[in-house]
Image (tube, rainbow, N blue to C red):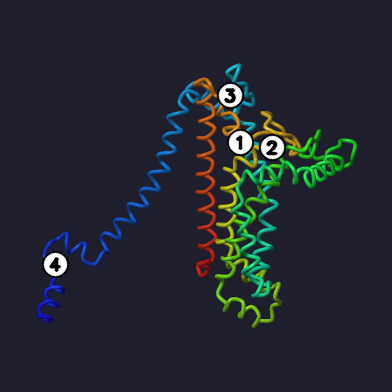
Amino acid sequence: MATTSRFRLNRPVSSPIGRMLQHGDIPYKVILVFSALLVLGLVVGVGVMLWASSATTRSRDGLNFITATDWNPVGGQFGALPFIAGTLSTSLVALVLAVPLGLAISVFLSELCPARLRATLGYLVELLAAIPSVVYGAWGIFVFIPALVQPLGNFLMNTFGDPQHGLFLPIFQGPFFGASFLAAGLILAVMILPTITAISRDVLLAVPRSQREGAYGIGCTQWEAISKVVLPYSLSGILGAVILGLGRALGETMAVTMVIGNVSQLSASLLSPGYTMASVIANEWGESRTAAYSSALLEIGLLLFVMSVLLNLLARLLVWSVARRNPEAHA
């Protein structure tokens, strides 16, 4: 009886569906393909919704919507250039500050930090990513701007923004009141720092030990091994970390809205208040009582969506190019 039962359980399944389900390979592949297509469908669906909802503004203004600088909903004038410039400038400030600092922290955690402290310090860095953006915004208003941004902004304005001084830089031209592109960029730098640091640290830890030992074997110092072997080997992964940080900087809303000043103007100075694309949507959506107003805000959302997709595609091409030049680096 036991032999017969085992024979019956192990008999090949004659039904085609039963054969497909017997080992689970085909259902597993179907689930994976469906999940990938679902993500792609969500992205396409968001793009189609934004495209359809912004038809009124596109048909009326066309490309002038991107190049115009006037934003006057009462008068029916809608120009997105100040918001595009504000988004790019704050994200650039955040990257300029967060990338070198995050890379330095990740090198310390992966190469120099004592093993007993590595996990604790790494957890504290990652904990910064769990703080809600509204908390960052409140901290920025009551602590960060008075304690750091205002002294720094006044120093930059008085030193580099005064035409009477020898070195005049328009990006630091006053007046300065605290809430500004500079404040938003600094807040964004703090917010994207844990993302860049955590991913870069994991990438550096994934570098094979043989790479470091080979560098030490030919007489390299620790700094030479890190700068000439470990970092170039990990370059594609570090670029991926920067891409993720840039993606958060472009789309961050609440913290930026609370510290940027919310003024619709095109200014070359980082010390001026302004708007980003995400913050103007969040701040003015509740006031969009007309179809034209809502359509203009949705087209700003469409532009932000397209900008994010294009930047990610460009960044992926860059990562691919770097990885192709260094095919042995799998980090």
Residue sitting at x 59%, y 56%:
195
Q: What kind of residue is marked 4?
A: Val
**Residue labelled with disc 2:** 260
Q: Gap between marks 3 and 1, in whole Å? A: 16 Å
* Alpha carbon separation for disc pair 1 and 4: 60 Å
Along the polypeptide, which appears first: circle 3 or circle 2?
A: 3
- Which of pointers 4 and 2 lies earlier in the amino acid sequence? 4
Q: CA distance from mark 3 to mark 2?
A: 20 Å
* Residue in view at x 35 percent, y 49 percent: 37
Measure how far apart labels 4 and 2 are at the Cα level.
Answer: 66 Å
Q: Is residue 10 left or right of residue 73?
A: left
The part of the image, by quadrant, that contains residue 250 is top right
Q: Position of residue 120 (x, y in %)?
A: 64, 67
**Residue at 49% of width from left, 21% of height from top?**
291
Q: Which residue is mark 1?
A: 279
Q: Earlier in the sequence, mark 1 or mark 2?
A: 2
The residue located at (69%, 78%) in the rendering is: 220
Task: Point out which mark residue 13 bears.
Answer: 4
Indicate the amino acid at tag 1. Answer: Ser
Separation of residues labelled 4 and 3 (CA atoms): 66 Å
Label 1 close to label 2 by CB (< 8 Å): yes
Per the model, the C-alpha gap separating discs 1 and 2 is 9 Å
Give percent across and percent down for residue 159.
86, 43
Look at mark 3 in the image and give the residue it sits on.
78
Contact between marks 4 and 2 (CB within 8 A): the answer is: no
Of tags 3 and 1, the one toward the viewer is: 1
Element at label 1:
helix
Q: Earlier in the sequence, mark 4 or mark 3?
A: 4
